[in-house]
Each structure stands twice: as C-alpha cells, then as structure tokens.
Amino acid sequence: MKSETIKAGQYNFSYTYHKGKKPITILPIHGLGGSKDYWQLIHNYPELTQYSILAPDLVGYGDSQPPPKGFKYNMREQATALKSLIDAVPVKDDMLLIPHSMGGPIGVYLAQLLGKRVKGIVYAEGNIDFNDCFGSNLVITKYTFEEYVATGFEKGLNAMKKRGEHQGIIDSQSKAGAVTIYRSSEDLVKVSREDKLAGELKALNVPTLVVYGEKNKGLWTSEKKMAELFPLVYTPGAAHIMMVDNPAAFYGEVTKFANGL
C-alpha cells in the first residue's frame, strides 16, 4: 500500500491505512530495527482486509521522521506516540493489536492506554523476559553508545549481509540508524529484565493469542511462561519474523483469532 504521513502531536509518522467494513482496526507493531513493511503482506488476505488496518513506522524507524528533542526511545514513549497517531488518523474503532518482538512491551503499554477499546492481542514473539533480548542485549554490552554510533552499527549491517539476511530486513535496520537501535535496546533490555510483562499482559484481561516461529520452539524461557497463561500456536517453517517467513500460516492464525472476537 502507498504510505501516508501525518503530524500526530509532536510526532511525524509514516504509515499505511486501509479502511475495512468491519468495526475493528488491526494495528501491527514492528520490532527493533523493523518497519511497517514487515506487515504489508496482510493485504493479500481478503478475510483480514474486511477489517481496517493501520500499520505505522514507530518513532525513529522506517520513514517516520526523527523524534523531537528529548525523546528517549523507551517503550512507554513509543506507546504514547502510537496513541497520538490513533487519535490523529483518527481511528475510532475498537482495536486488535499485533505486537512483534520489541513491539511486545509497546503493545502492552498501548493497551493500558486504550483500555476497553482493545478487543484482542496477537503477541508475536513479543519480548517478555531478559532471555528474549538476544539482539538488543548484544548491542548494549558489546559497545558503548559512542562506539556503536561510530563503528558498531555499520559492522552489524555488514554481518547481516554476510549471513544473507533478507534485503528488506537490512534496509529497515539501515533506516532506523544507530541512535534509534541503541537507545531502543537500552530500554528494551531494562523492561524485559524486570520480568513484569507477562503479568501486565495477563492483567489486561483481553483475549490473547501467542505466536512463536516453529524454528524457535524450545529456545526461549518466555515460551513456557506464555504457554501457562495464554493459548499458544507455532508458525510452521518460520523463525522470529514469522509474518515474512510464512505469511499464509501466520495470517491464517490471525484471521481465526480476529473472526472469533
């Protein structure tokens, strides 16, 4: 879909928006170094396009403009910014959130702001505890902020290229840039280490489906914690970015969940 831009409070967002007939808006929330581009295949599934779909680049990511001075890239700030976007579009529907990876805590905090408007959450390998910080913790322990900005970020991009990562993933990392990635990683590790997110998600008392990539089955301590609290499914043949690795299976589960709300 064609991207749009909007001034939402003190933030300038890039996003895509599809208006559907059903009175629920789906809001996917990308992770660290991600972008709204991760979610665009959702438009290939007619049962989901019956819903409205708002897919933003988070502040400092993708094609959203750099944040205002003083923005710290923490998860609660990102949630507050998303609430500003929802108000500015405006979206008046109830909502289904699909937070992925770093988007997990952002989604929890956004749901706290939206209250009863949130009718469901698909938690797609969203961060829960410290062991989920496989990339973010590496960034902030291997480098100081100054080192990462000077050389570490570029080294990381080169390593991704050598591993043969999908070009879209490399491009989204590159757009985010060193400052966004480092500062986001600092807070993501902090809130994950506190190990409160699973309890906060449960306390929302909102229908929640947890999705993991099948290739990651058994890797994360959060998987067991979440399976004890919520229904949990696996996306066959997929790793962490399951909406790209196997979109048909991932969005099939989202469709079943959405239609049951």
Image (cartoon, rainbow, N blue to C red):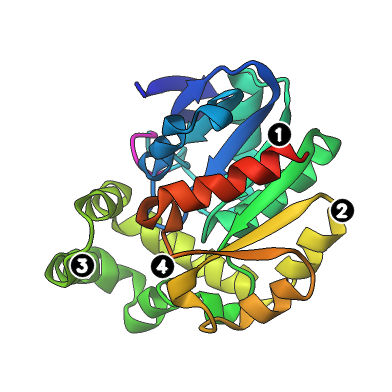
For image coordinates 59% across by 37% down, the residue present is 27
Q: Amino acid at mark 3?
A: Met
For image coordinates 42% across by 21% down, the residue present is 5
Compare marks 3 and 4 and give the one earlier in the sequence.
3
Mark 2 vs mark 4, foreground winner is 4
- Can you give x and y, in whole percent of width and height, for residue 70 in the image? 51, 46
Compare marks 3 and 2 and give the one earlier in the sequence.
3
Left or right relative to 88: residue 108: right
Q: In whole angstroms, how far apart are the C-alphas of marks 1 and 2?
A: 14 Å
Helix, strand or loop at disc 2?
Answer: loop
Q: Which residue is mark 1?
A: 95
- Can you give x and y, in whole percent of width and height, for residue 244 in the image? 37, 52
Q: Which residue is mark 4?
A: 239
Left or right relative to 113: residue 163: left
Q: In which quadrant will I find the C terminus?
A: top right
Q: Which residues are magenta?
A: 60-64
Compare marks 2 and 4 and give the one earlier in the sequence.
2
Q: Which mark is residue 205?
A: 2
- Can you give x and y, in whole percent of width and height, for residue 194 in the image? 69, 76
Q: Are marks 1 and 2 in contact (CB under 8 Å)?
A: no
Q: Which residue is mark 3?
A: 160
Q: Amino acid at mark 2?
A: Asn
